[in-house]
Image (spheres, rainbow, N blue to C red):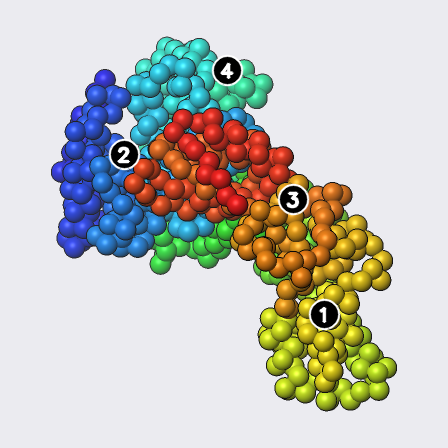
Amino acid sequence: MKDTTITFESLKEKLNYFPESSLKKIEDAYLYAKKEHEGEKRLTGDEFITHPLHVAEILASLNADDVTIISALLHEVLNNGKDATKEEIEEKFGSEVAIIVDSISKINKLELMDETESSAIYLRKVLVGLAEDPRVLYIKLADRLHNMRTNWAIKPEKQKDKANETMSVLVPIAHRLGINSIKSELEDICLSYLKPDVYQDILERLDKTKLELNDNLQEMKESLSHLLTDNGIEHEIKGRVKSVYSIYNKLNNGKRWDQIYDILALRIFVEKETDCYTVIGLIHSKYRPLPKRFKDYIANPKANMYQSLHTSVFGSDGEVYEVQVRTYEMDEIAEKGMASHWSYKEKGTRKVQALMEQKLEMFRNIIETNNDESDSSFASNVENDLLGELIYVFTPKGDVIELPKDATPLDFAYRIHGRVGDTTVGAIVNDNIVPLSYNLKNNDIVKIITNNNASPNQDWLSLVKTSQAKSRIKSYFSKKEREEHILKGKTILEKEIRKKKLSINEVLSEENLNKIFKDLKIENLDELYLQIGSLRYTAGYIIALTAEDKHNVEDVLMERIKPTVVKQEKDDIIVDGNSNIMYSLAKCCKPVKGDDIIGFITKGEGVSVHKKTCPNAKDKAERLIKVEWNMASDSMYITDLNILVNNANFLADLVNEASKEKIHIMEIKNKDIDNGTLCSVTIKVKDKEALEHFKNQLNNFKNVKILENV
């Protein structure tokens, strides 16, 4: 079962849509990859270079651009090449290619460990790749398709795991991107591994009637062709038997074999959109349609840009045929998804283009609004916004808006524009006034009523379903709170100045303000008011900084933190028995809750909190002050780990272990050193106990050593 049919020359024949200049760059990439993979074999026994060639071939069938083809040929050189580096790839092939190849290399190190948290981590990596460049996803899908075609070569116990991962993670993404040609083949292959008995049973049933089915298809095809030719419609017709997975899906949803009416399918291609409707009319005039089986996806495209007319009719032989009618361009988009649309964007319809932009925006919004979320929150948002059940509703002008199931008019409003959402005061759905909590349904026509003087309500956070709407509402209240603090701070300061019988203009002179800004390390007057209004500094403290007989900054702060503030159990650090005192966790040693800590007065930053072992906290005894952790706080703390690694798969192990331990990885930096790779990892962790447990787990991995920090 060797896969030796592909060569660069055979690939080149399928790249005939490129000019010579692009073909030269593609050939350079092939030669570079061939050299990097020289001597390597796949588990199939083939030369390793055949895999990137096949991936490039799959992408060529989607009319992918030259950057995508080049990246596909190079997509394994960082993980499985000899000496390739991202810097070298960037130098030879450009930054776009380098970023894509680097993203794919990271994605390919991860595996689905279970159906919950690890799945979310895997999706995170895929989506982050998309946020940088959507072509990352196309290469990943093509890479997985070829690997699934040769899935027989891996260990039997791994075959099912790989099929499950593909079905749960990649097939839904292929569907959302509208790449039907990849999605359909992946579904059939995965079914053959996940449910081999069912797969074989369906195949055998089809095989028993294959000759008869093909004869029926041919007769119906000829009959329809005569009908359209007689009416002057230029066309092309293709017939097919429905895919095994499609039939399985219907059987799995409770239908019997004899209730599956669309095993036989015909696809009719025409030049113009108007011809599609003419063809449907002609077909219905000759063949009796099944009730409620007509679907107009031209006027109402699916969210993945799919457009076509669908109907099911009884043929003259009594069989039921599913007939799809579309233009050639619509077929390109249906089979190849967004890649095709980019190629044909000059001819693309406004609705299809708008839906594509919505889809890409959804992917990006998921990434941008979840940087500080927990893994479970991120997974939930992915499930709801991207992989969950979707509905399609309309603006009064007929534009299609995609939303998750049970979305409300507020979600709709924020999808239109942030300002529309912020000023929403009501909604009309299908000419009826509805509450903002109303759950929208497919094909609803939604009109949003706005008032420029209106603003969001905190209760909206419990009504909206999309992360985009939640993020916008939270942002509004964060900004509003800031403005209120600034106004409050200005009032408090001016009132205190008058109370001390001082001149506002003199206290807040340019010279004094520059001194305050420098001492407190702030940039403008609004920031000063904000610090006072949010109770970081008192007005008396600020005035004292400007007085002729003022103490130094440290003395004033020492006076401020005398136990006069009512204790509030909300800060992470309690200073000298008081909360609500300005402090900062030192960046040099990054203490986490549970560490032994000390504090000392700083100029402009309040109390600086260090680990007791931190060398930067020594020799400051005269400025020491008692600090302790507020054990009631549920904050997460940022800290660093330095890890010495001699393990190529460590990134995957690290991410999966962090997911299991509910530790959030914020940044990873690698540096090659003499005895391995120094991996510097910035994480968010609950406390010292959780950190120590995580470090112990990592130390259990082969060729991994945690280097002790301060």
Is residue 61 in view from this perspective?
A: no
Q: Amino acid at mark 1?
A: Asp
* In contact (CB < 8 Å): disc 2 and disc 3: no
Q: Earlier in the sequence, mark 1 or mark 3?
A: 1
* In contact (CB < 8 Å): disc 2 and disc 4: no
Q: Amino acid at mark 3?
A: Asp
Q: Earlier in the sequence, mark 2 or mark 3?
A: 2
Q: Estimate the spatial distance between the alpha carbons at disc 1 and disc 2, rounded to whole Å.
A: 61 Å
Element carrying mark 4: helix
Q: Estimate the spatial distance between the alpha carbons at disc 1 and disc 3, rounded to whole Å.
A: 26 Å
Residue drawn at x 77%, y 55% is 576
Q: Is residue 170 above or below residue 19?
A: above
Q: Earlier in the sequence, mark 1 or mark 4?
A: 4
Q: Earlier in the sequence, mark 1 or mark 2?
A: 2
Q: Which residue is mark 1?
A: 555
Q: Which residue is mark 3?
A: 596
Q: Amino acid at mark 2?
A: Asn
Task: Give how far across and how far down residue 284 sits, in percent.
Answer: 47, 36
Q: Nearer the viewer, mark 2 or mark 4?
A: 2
Q: Which residue is mark 2?
A: 80
Q: Amino acid at mark 4?
A: Trp
